[in-house]
Amino acid sequence: MKCGGQYTFYKILICWCCICPPYKRFIIVNRESIMKISYSMSFACFDCCKSFKREYQIASGSYFDELKCPHCGGVAYNFGRHFKAPKSNAQKQWVKIRFLFDHGFRFQKIRVGSSHHSVVHYPKTLEEAKEFVVKYKDYAFSSK
């Protein structure tokens, strides 16, 4: 598949498609511009059903898919900067999140259509999630 599209932001060429891996979506045009950009990335642990954020600076290139959970010591997975975790006692929501994660969805933005505002909303229930993974399977991250 061909890359879905790109735009320039702070003199950085950014790819917003869901085909390119997250760590390869940025092409540095001006190193000084990129040194200042950082994001808070959300990590979630399925063992204790808690989440936390860590700052990620694009210039460092230190993108992590998983970290050690500060709450229980288990594995916490990177869900990107758009993830909003449910309360730790909302078990049905955590089951849905695990289902989506197992099928390659890490709450990345999925854009359909020609407008950058055409973003697909993530499902609210497990039943909706089952339909969602079938409909948007081309946008899932592969485990390769």
Image (tube, helix red, strand yellow):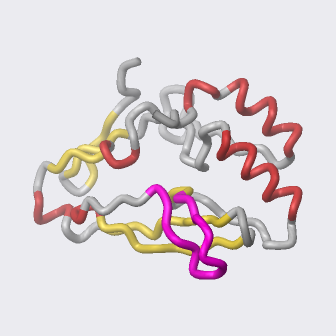
Tag count in the figure?
A: 0
Q: Residue 17: give x, y in percent of width and height.
A: 43, 34
Residue in view at x 77 percent, y 44 percent: 123
Quadrant of res 70: bottom right
Indicate yes or no whether the magenta region holds residue 71.
Answer: yes
Q: Residue 119: give x, y in percent of width and height.
A: 59, 40
Indicate yes or no whether the magenta region holds residue 54.
Answer: no
Quadrant of res 102: top right
Q: Residue 139: give x, y in percent of width and height.
A: 55, 31
For the magenta stretch, what is the residue range? Answer: 65-78
Residue 60 located left or right of residue 44: left
Residue 61 located left or right of residue 48: left
Eyeballing the image, is 21 above or below 36? Answer: above
Q: Nearer the viewer, residue 54 or 17?
A: 54
Residue 121 located left or right of residue 40: right
Residue in view at x 37 percent, y 68 percent: 56
Q: Residue 88: give x, y in percent of width and height.
A: 79, 72
Quadrant that contains the C terminus:
top left
Residue in view at x 72 percent, y 66 percent: 47
Eyeballing the image, is 89 above or below 126? Answer: below
Q: Nearer the viewer, residue 143 or 11?
A: 143
Quadrant that contains the N terminus:
top left
Q: Nearer the viewer, residue 44 or 28?
A: 44
Q: Residue furthest bottom?
A: 71
Q: Residue furthest front?
A: 73
Residue in view at x 58 percent, y 65 percent: 76
Eyeballing the image, is 28 above or below 67? Answer: above
